Amino acid sequence: MLYRVRGAILIGIFLVSIISWPRPTSVTYFPHTDSGDALFDYFKQVVTFHPLNKVGNVIDYNYGNPKVWYALITLLYVDILDTTGTLYSMAKFAGLRDPVTLDFEGSTAAYCVDAFSISMGALVEGGKTGITAMVVGIAFFISIFFAPIFASIPPWATGGALIIVGSLMIRNVREINWDYIGDAVPAFITLIIIPLSYNIAYGLIAGVLTYLAINFIPWAIRKLTRDRIVPPNYDASEEWVIPPGSIFPFWILKLTGRTQAADEGLVLEERYHRGSVDTASQDHVNGGTINTMEKSPMDSL
């Protein structure tokens, strides 16, 4: 990757895997043990397919059972938070977010379908369209039949790739407002909880709750004292605002005939905003140099 070799991450994974497959080595993935013999017997099948016979029968469709709704709600919020973390981090890294609305094209469809296949490695290689997801989806389908091969890739082969992906994603932390504790601590809690819990949703929940706990008390005191008691560096806090646009998806605005009003509002907002791309997302394109241009009102029109 240092020399921008295409597919460097995949080359590294396959190279380490091939080195780990021969049994008479000290780094083999198939040691001469009972578990190693079982893994090697499965690996030798190369191609196999196991039909799903009983998976659907174990699902309880009795929606009168409170446990069913508990499971649905749990899966819903976990899926929404996981999807949000993945979608927006990838869109930010690729520089696809709108500088005014902070949204990206096709976000509604992505949330509704939730069947995207995006990887940081694909973005680094230049993939920024739906064709990337389609190719990855086809590759996943093919891998079903070659499960013995892909299941035999050792964890130390993919561990290095995860470190590289993490180093690419961590660059966004420099845009966090570290000057105000009410913004810095929730962001830090989110960064720590995600890897420790192995779950994006848990990290986001911890960050949101921490943000509310830290910022609600100063806000309430400021309101009760009519701005007489405020933190010393309260002015350094990042203002929380709702981006221009609408909380409703495009198709609802289309049905209600409100798309024209929403578009007019965006044009008015763009006249007073500077058109720029995400700074942390474009360093890999510009070699670390960020170029921004002042956007005139005529450019927005």
Image (spheres, helix red, strand yellow):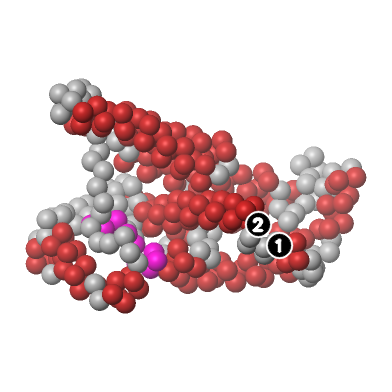
Residue 101 drawn in magenta: yes
Q: Magenta part mainly helix, strand or loop? A: loop
Q: Which residue lies at the image location 86% right of the left edge and 46% below the top edge?
A: 35
Q: Label 1: which residue? A: 59
Front residue (pair 109, 256): 256
Front residue of 118 and 86: 86
Q: Nearer the viewer, residue 160 or 252?
A: 252
Q: Position of residue 284 (x, y in %)?
A: 37, 51
Q: Which residue is mark 2?
A: 65
What is the secondary structure assignment of the residue under circle 2?
A: loop
* Residue 206 at least partly seen: yes
Give percent across and percent down for residue 108.
39, 66
Q: Earlier in the sequence, mark 2 or mark 1?
A: 1
- At 80% from the left and 51% from the top, the residue drawn is 22
Above or below residue 189? Residue 73 is below
- Locate residue 251: give its quadrant: bottom left
Q: Which residues are magenta?
A: 100-108
Q: Residues within 10 Å of mark 2 (few under 14, many from 20)?
A: few
